[in-house]
Image (cartoon, helix red, strand yellow):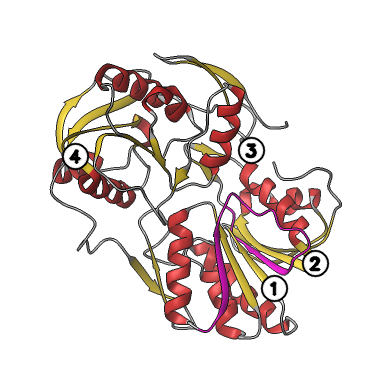
Amino acid sequence: MPNMTTDVLMTPQRSLTLCRPGGGPGLRAWDAADELLLQAADERLRTGQRVAIVDDGFGALTLGLADAAPEVVADSAVLPLALARNAAANGLSSPAVANWQAPPSGPFDVVILRIPRQLDYLEYLLRWCNEVLAEDGLLLAGGMIKHLPDRSVDVFNRLVTTEAVLPARKKARVVACRRGTSVLAGWDGLLRGFELPDAGLPVKGLPAVFSRERLDIGARQLLPWAAQAANSLAPGARVLDLACGNGVQGLTVLSHRDDVSVLFADVSSQAVASAETNVRQALPAAQASFVCQDGTDASGEFDLVLLNPPFHDGGAVGDHIALKLFAQASRALRPGGQLLMVGNRHLGYHRSLRKSFRQVRQLAADPKFVVLAAAEPVPQRGGRS
């Protein structure tokens, strides 16, 4: 399969052959933080303990600790697909993966957590751990030092009791903690937001959602074009807000048209939950549906696709996510449909879009962002990557 690197990870329990499906060339399915967490867990886990793994990337932690039969929860819909593939490649069973729309309940004896890049999301995770850890439960939290959010030490000190800071290795860090008393209930930072320009509708986001407290500059550039496209749609048209985040683009369409439907899709369960909350509260009669998945597997279903593609994939930066979404968007369109997207100007999306569309037009630009319209999909072989 193209753009997929396979490597061997040596864990305390077994050797694993792991791949990173859909990743850019050279991107690996684990890092030194996974190795350090696996070592720390192997030294501390006891037989019969109930174990939870939070935000495993591509299955390294889950499969490395398969003997403990861990329960798994992740915000990203990438994990279930990657875990199933990597489990099969190693002759292991693939456990179900929960997300934040329906997380597992405690008590857990041990929680193994990848520290996220967003400070608010880290607070969310630690507060959740305080809810689900047993009274004498252990939290092992780890990440790459360069990706730890600013002031993360302050958040750990405020919310949990740090028992030990393990020696750093290969620029990774792991801390062992005991639970604190602060939980998600009553936390005023759980939902934060702003008002959608022109429409005047409230928009809120959970902690893992990108730009939840203010409208993203790129999204602002796309909004008037989304509104214009909405007004030109035929009655009964179908719209896909792909990589929807908190749902501002699809919400804009629905605020202009009550006779079209919008599907909100995002890889983040917290993004999908936020978009659903925003639509149901602002426009309860709207024709809207919501799905947490890695891109879209739709074929010829939509008259309009709206996209503000991410270019960060964990710690990696590149256009591999956008290229995949462009190809998926081209398959998702009905004849005569179009993709409207906004992206960072320096990434050259006007060129890469031509791999999936015959017609690409620039609608607007400033020194940082460009808004593009694409139509007439190029026929593609194969399915989703």
Question: For mark 2, does the 10 Å Cα neighbourhood hold few (<14), some (14 to 19), or many (20 or more) residues?
Answer: some
Spot occupied by residue 77 in the image (x, y as percentages of width and height): 52, 47
Residue under pointer 2: 334
User: Does residue 319 show up?
Assistant: no
Find residue 112 and report its image quarter. top left
| Mark 4 → mark 3, Cα distance in angstroms | 37 Å
Whether tag 1 and tag 2 are in contact, CB under 8 A, the answer is yes
Is residue 300 positioned above or below 164 on the image? below
Whether tag 2 and tag 3 are in contact, CB under 8 A, the answer is no
Residue type at tag 1: Arg
Whether tag 1 and tag 4 are in contact, CB under 8 A, the answer is no
Residue type at tag 2: Arg
Residue lying at 48% horizontally and 52% vertically, measured from the top left? 268
- Which mark is on residue 238? 1
* Residue bounds of the magenta highlight: 285-309
Residue under pointer 4: 134
